[in-house]
């Protein structure tokens, strides 16, 4: 049996310029079946014409795997169509197919989907491949959705969920299975992913992590993490991204990991991760150790400065932590990106701009002004629906940057336009003065400035001459999906 696993080609264009990271989950799935069959991973999210590429390579594969978040799901269906035309079976996994399996199973989409691997995929996928090889029914495979009859069209059967694996049962990712090995970077440095833990015990109302993993936090051994970093380095990585859901849930362990990186002689690599503001703020000693170990980028989930919004989002106190966290990180020359969420039920224009002011005050290097997104099955969606504030259920726009709701004071379009203006205004002269990117990645920075300067100069001129309006640019960016561009 030959298996092809495809990453989602749909990316957030503005982030893709800064970092493009190979898919770790698919390399992990590959590791769990490569003793049974031939398995290849195609990280197609950097390709100009991914559909052509898939059409060219897909022939001969028996099973094609696709993964999708909500905003990526429609394109996964398009790729599934190509796979089905080649005669392959298709298996879907990831957040959206997991959370919407019931609805998908009853919909027309199910004609393009033979199986859904729900939740943590490694063991379920392995058992599916074993069953196919043995010609057995998948009836007893926990965590799997499938068609019971060959006729399809009667909906899918959903087996009971699978308990989470023990981390010792999870094999090291198989990076050798990758067909595309270049084009992945953070700034200009080749990057790969290494996970150190899975899951999170917090209960943020907008987050889907708990629906995938429950409120559990499982830690890989530090020895395994070091071995995995070495493997990523062997495969060309000069930078490592830890995509853990909440790596700072155990700050002491992260500190031990940093020490292990130093002891292993791996502190020359550039490390990046996402972290909670409270975890980072909890220990200056931890952040100093991160700096020593080679961390140079942290995405902080700050979410909001507004207490009312923090309560709505299911967060505790945050803004004080954020201040401390950003300070500690900057003291160690670590680039800080922050997620700030606007468009909450009682937000008016001034509330949205509060996030902007916070980012400016903290001199955040890359703030991302997200818009509250009612992801399927989350508590936030249920609450917003109850309030009558959800305005769009076309999931292709559920990427955190598009407005899919209104507030009690602002229309969907107003939320979108104000947020677009915040992105536009942030990256001006003041930002040029304080951002750390220009110091840490001067070549990348100079190149981006050379690329962007004529673009913004043209927009400014068009505005000054009255040839175009801000609204024209807004609509242009909305259409292209580059919502962080704006007019400086
Ligand atoms: S802390 Fe992060 S991972 Fe955990 S529930 Fe909140 S948003 Fe999700």
Image: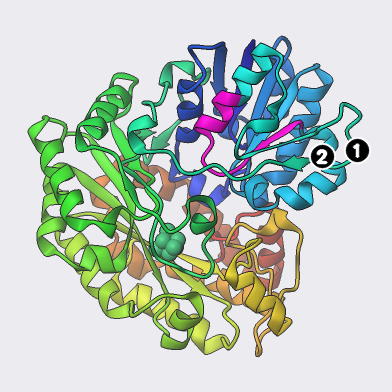
Q: Residue at x 54, y 67 (%)?
A: 206
Question: Which residue: 63% across, 62% down?
Answer: 375
- Per the image, the residue denoted by label 1 is 153
The tag on residue 30 is none
Left or right relative to 345: residue 17? left
Asked if ligand 1 lies within 8 A of label 2, the reply is no
Q: CA distance from mark 2 to mark 1?
A: 7 Å
- Tell me the tag on residue 110: 2
Residue 21 in view (yes/no): yes
Q: Position of residue 48 (x, y in %)?
A: 64, 31
Q: In what quadrant does ligand 1 lie?
A: bottom left
Residue 466 is at least partly visible in this image = no
Q: Is residue 270 left or right of residue 124?
A: left
Q: Is mark 1 within 8 Å of ligand 1?
A: no
Q: Is residue 19 left or right of residue 46?
A: left
Q: Which numbered disc, 2 or 1, marks the residue that appears first in the sequence?
A: 2
């Amino acid at each position: 049996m030959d298996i092809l696993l495809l990453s989602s080609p749909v990316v957030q264009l503005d982030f893709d310029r800064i970092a493009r990271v190979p898919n770790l989950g698919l390399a992990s799935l590959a590791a769990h079946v490569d003793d049974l069959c031939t398995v290849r991973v195609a990280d197609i999210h950097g390709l100009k014409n991914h559909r052509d590429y898939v059409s060219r390579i897909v022939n001969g594969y028996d099973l094609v795997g696709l993964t999708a978040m909500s905003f990526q799901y429609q394109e996964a269906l398009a790729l599934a169509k190509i796979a089905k035309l080649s005669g392959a079976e298709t298996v879907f996994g990831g957040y959206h197919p997991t959370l919407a399996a019931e609805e998908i199973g009853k919909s027309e989409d199910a004609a393009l989907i033979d199986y859904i691997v729900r939740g943590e995929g490694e063991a379920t996928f392995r058992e599916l491949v074993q069953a196919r090889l043995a010609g057995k029914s998948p009836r007893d495979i926990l965590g799997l959705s499938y068609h019971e009859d060959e006729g399809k069209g009667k909906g899918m059967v959903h087996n009971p969920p699978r308990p989470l694996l023990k981390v010792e049962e999870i094999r090291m990712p198989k990076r050798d299975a990758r067909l595309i090995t270049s084009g992945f970077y953070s700034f200009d440095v080749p990057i790969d992913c290494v996970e150190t833990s899975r899951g999170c015990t917090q209960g943020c109302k907008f987050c889907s992590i708990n629906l995938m993993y429950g409120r559990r936090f499982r830690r890989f051994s530090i020895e395994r993490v070091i071995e995995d970093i070495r493997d990523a380095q062997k495969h060309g990585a000069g930078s490592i991204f830890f995509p853990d859901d909440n790596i700072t849930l155990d700050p002491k362990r992260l500190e031990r990991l940093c020490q292990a990186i130093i002891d292993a002689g791996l502190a020359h690599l550039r490390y990046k991760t996402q972290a909670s503001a409270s975890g980072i703020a909890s220990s200056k000693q931890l952040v100093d150790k991160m700096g020593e170990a080679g961390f140079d980028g942290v995405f902080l989930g700050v979410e909001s400065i507004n207490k009312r919004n923090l309560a709505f989002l299911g967060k505790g106190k945050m803004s004080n932590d954020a201040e401390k966290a950003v300070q500690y990180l900057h003291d160690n020359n670590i680039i800080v990106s922050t997620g700030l969420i606007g468009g909450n039920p009682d937000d008016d224009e001034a509330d949205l701009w509060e996030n902007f002011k916070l980012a400016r005050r903290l001199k955040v290097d890359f703030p991302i002004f997200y818009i509250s997104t009612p992801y399927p099955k989350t508590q936030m969606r249920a609450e917003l629906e109850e309030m009558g504030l959800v305005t769009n259920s076309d999931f292709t726009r559920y990427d955190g940057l598009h407005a899919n709701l209104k507030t009690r004071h602002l229309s969907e379009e107003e939320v979108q336009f104000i947020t677009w203006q915040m992105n536009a205004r942030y990256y001006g002269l003041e930002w040029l003065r304080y951002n750390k990117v220009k110091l840490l990645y001067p070549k990348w920075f100079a190149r981006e400035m050379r690329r962007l300067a004529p673009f913004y100069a043209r927009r400014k001129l068009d505005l000054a001459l009255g040839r175009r309006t801000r609204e024209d640019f807004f609509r242009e960016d909305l259409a292209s999906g580059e919502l962080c561009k704006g007019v400086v």
